[in-house]
């Protein structure tokens, strides 16, 4: 079922172009290093958590691989925006819901590294910035949204949907902010630049976030069923 959904995505969205991952060499080196430093504590913590996951239950290796593939496929899709640039889904909401933001940061950096090396999608110097916006901030937003809605006893399907939607959308907000910090507008400063960068992607990103939210519901249910777990007890015991 999930494979059919992925195939549908590739058929519906086959266009390639410049994506919202910040491209190699686009950021000044000072800012590139800044985001690397900010990213590292999350990734180091995430590596430790993943090691414990694998030690506690070998099935986690399958579920982590599944989530990594899900993020890779969705974030590799590139959809033209109205301005001639491109947007894409992120896929981080699913991983955030299941594992939390720290594990998601490791999954994110692995995906972004392979995309940079194999697809020229993003870059090595901008890996820190892209990981921070997509995997870390997107992961935190998705995780906290799901936790909040669960406490409010909101229907699980909607909780997964909204978590994926906000994780996706927050990634583009942060990326716009990162670009605005590096390239402030002469007239409007950082705020003016932020509004300009954000307006480039907002038209296409809202429907993409909705699409990702719906797809994440199916992926979440598929993963839960595959691991033979009920939806009330979490697929993974969170250690966040």
Image: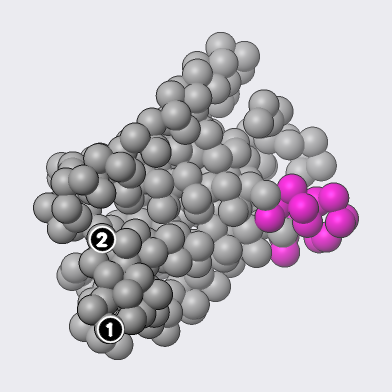
Q: Element at badge 1?
A: loop
Dot 2 alpha-carbon crowd within 10 angstroms: few under 14, some 14 to 19, many 20 or more: some
Let me know if residue 234 is in the magenta part.
no
Q: On the image, numbered disc 2 is attached to which residue?
A: 182
* Mark 1 crowd level (few <14, some 14–19, many ≥20, 10 Å Cα): few
Q: Is residue 157 magenta?
A: yes
Q: Is residue 120 above or below residue 113?
A: below
Write down the region rendered in magenta.
145-158
Q: Closer to the camera, 40 or 109?
A: 40
Query: Does residue 204 appear in the picture of this structure?
Result: no
- Report if residue 105 is visible in the image: yes
* In front of the other: 98 or 195: 195
- Report the disc number at residue 172: none
Q: Nearer the viewer, residue 215 or 179?
A: 179
**Residue sitting farthest toward the bottom:** 82
**What element does badge 2 sit on?**
helix
Residue 44: % across, % down:
43, 24
Please, is residue 71 above or below residue 213 in the view?
Answer: above
Which residue position holds label 1? Answer: 187
Residue 27, horizontal then vertical, whole percent: 19, 55
Q: Nearer the viewer, residue 228 or 166?
A: 166
């Amino acid at each position: 079922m999930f494979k059919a959904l992925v195939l549908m995505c590739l058929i519906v969205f086959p266009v390639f172009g410049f994506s919202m991952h910040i491209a190699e060499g686009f950021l000044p080196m000072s800012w590139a290093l800044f985001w690397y430093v900010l990213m590292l504590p999350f990734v180091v913590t995430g590596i430790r958590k993943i090691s414990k996951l694998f030690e506690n239950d070998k099935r986690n290796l399958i579920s982590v691989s599944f989530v990594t593939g899900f993020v890779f496929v969705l974030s590799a899709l590139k959809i033209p925006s109205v301005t001639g640039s491109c947007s894409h889904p992120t896929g981080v909401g699913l991983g955030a819901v299941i594992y939390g933001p720290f594990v998601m940061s490791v999954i994110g950096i692995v995906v972004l590294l392979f995309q940079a090396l194999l697809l020229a999608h993003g870059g090595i110097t901008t890996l820190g910035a892209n990981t921070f916006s997509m995997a870390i901030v997107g992961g935190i937003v998705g995780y906290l949204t799901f936790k909040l809605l669960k406490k409010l006893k909101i229907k699980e399907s909607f909780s997964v949907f909204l978590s994926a939607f906000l994780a996706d959308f927050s990634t583009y907000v942060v990326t716009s902010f990162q670009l605005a910090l590096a390239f402030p507008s002469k007239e409007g400063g950082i705020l003016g630049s932020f509004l300009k960068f954000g307006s480039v992607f907002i038209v296409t990103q809202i429907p993409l976030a909705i699409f990702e939210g719906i797809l994440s519901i199916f992926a979440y249910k598929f993963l839960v069923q595959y691991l033979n777990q009920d939806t009330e007890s979490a697929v993974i015991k969170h250690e966040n």
